Amino acid sequence: MSTQQQTTGTRLATYLLMAAAVIMSIFQYLYCRSFWTDEAAVVVNIMDRDFAGLMKPLMYYQMAPILYLWITKAITTIFTPNEYSFRILSLIAYLTSLWLVWKLLTRFVKDGLAVFIGLAFFVFNNKLFYYSSELKQYMTDTMVTLILLYVATDPLSANRRKMLVMSLVGALAIFLSNVVVTVLPMIFLFIFFSESKPWQWSHLRSMLLMGFVWLLAFAINYFMFMHDHPSRAQQLIFFAEAFPPTNLLSKQALAFFEYKLQVVKRDFGFGQNNTHPTISIQEYVHYAIFLFLLAGYVWNVTRRANRILLLIVIPILMHAVLAYFKAYPLAIRNMLYQYPLICIILALGAEKWLSLTSRIRPVLTAVTFILTAVLCVIFVRVQLPHQVEESKPVLSFMQEHSRGEETIYSYSAGNCTLDAYIRTKYYKPTGPVIWGTYFKGDHVQAAAEIGSLHPKSAWIFFAHFADGLEHRIMGELSNSGYRQTDSVRAKGAAAYRIEAAAVK
């Protein structure tokens, strides 16, 4: 028996669980779902600019760390710019995070079955899985957080070497992830109090030097890429529900925190994102297990557990403070990096309960493995393949059924999607492209804008639109003397061909 208390069966089950996570994430990646509007906006920004241009504020109210943009730009420059090359960084970040979570669990948790349980919470979190194939920096945030934690808690690393590595890794992390401002204070305090004599001058000097490097990197990143950002006003509007009220004792504050609790329950649980309602029982089971393990952790009040709690609580408190000052929203996508830390807490809670049930451990082990296998089957059925806005089938249909030089009109919300697929050469317009202006869902004005072009024949492309909007627009055009001659629909996207009534 090694320091890690696990049987051959538990070890094998852990490897199978990790293999399942790898297979599912690669399957979703290879499925190659279409870019949706936010991803398409990032695609347009990256393809429209060189490396120096990406240092300027992005268009379409997008924000992303500069290193994330540069790495993605380099990949898509070397390889063909498509869904695979734009999303490969997110997949790498997910797979790296999976490995790091496993390594950290084995570092903090002695019981092999508890490690398996903590890892299962990571694998079957629908948000983590979704962002493994999304052109957004949220999975990179998770990976960076785990890398920092892994290096900082390395028990074999000499103090001087650790300080040098952490100085460099922390500085790079600041340019790769915007959330490290909540993570680095946690890392700093953890390293500081890990020393037997933290106030010794040699240790204190190394800590101050490391802190100075981080502050310098943060200042450069903040004043070059974040200060007075032109998208700030729009971001505040977009994330209005993700910032707490100024008066934390008001009824509005109570309503805000009740709402955020519901969001956390929905998005940090299993299967709540775009799934059918038949899994509600599994959701309640998930929450019951979650609270049970959390209670086990609270019961397990030890020095080791308290140090790990320090790692979890500081980022949460820092994030809450930044949200209060409207510097960073309390939105799940921006808090995704915290969930692996919660998995460690749950594993420690499981370890406490398992230590009290040695007599029935074989039964508990068998039940755990069976429930995980059932959960895996449900997860595959519910989550794979995950689709958002399938514009590619619509664009392919338009390409195949084009009649010479036809005008293509893009409803405003789908402009970035159409532009991204034109830039990546997936769709080649046969005629002029008219980019619709933003009408906030006003179908009358949109139809009037299309009619003002006086097209004899045109395709109208929709993506990221409210249900029923396209039918209202088509109704207005019908009243204006146009008739629909062809159409195609897919999830979240559609296209209609119209012709002037006099055209045969």
Image (tube, grey):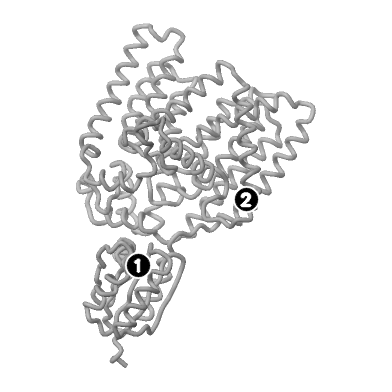
- Crowding at dot 1, Cα within 10 Å, few <14 / some 14-19 / many 20+, comes out as some
* Amino acid bearing label 1: Tyr
Quadrant where the N terminus sits is top right
Residue 476 placed where, x, y %? 33, 77
Q: Is residue 303 left or right of residue 58?
A: right
In terms of image quadrants, where is residue 251? top left
Q: Earlier in the sequence, mark 2 or mark 1?
A: 2
2 vs 1, front mark? 2
Q: Residue furthest front?
A: 251
Q: Is residue 25 left or right of residue 35?
A: right
Mark-to-mark CA distance, 2 and 1: 39 Å
Residue occupying image coordinates x 71% and y 32%: 7
* Amino acid bearing label 2: Ser
Quadrant where the C terminus sits is bottom left
Residue 2 placed where, x, y %? 66, 24
Residue 18 disc label: none
Q: Which residue is mark 1?
A: 426
Residue occupying image coordinates x 76% and y 26%: 358
- Crowding at dot 2, Cα within 10 Å, few <14 / some 14-19 / many 20+, comes out as some
Does the residue at mark 2 contact the one at mark 1 (Cβ under 8 Å)?
A: no
Residue 204 placed where, x, y %? 35, 11
Q: Which residue is mark 2?
A: 280
Residue occupying image coordinates x 26% and y 81%: 405
Q: Residue furthest right?
A: 359
Frontmost residue, 126 versus 195: 126
Residue 87 placed where, x, y %? 40, 52
Q: Is residue 32 above or below residue 219?
A: below
Q: Is residue 81 above or below residue 224?
A: below
Q: Is residue 455 above or below residue 134?
A: below
Q: What secondary structure is marked by label 2?
A: helix
Q: What secondary structure is marked by label 1?
A: loop
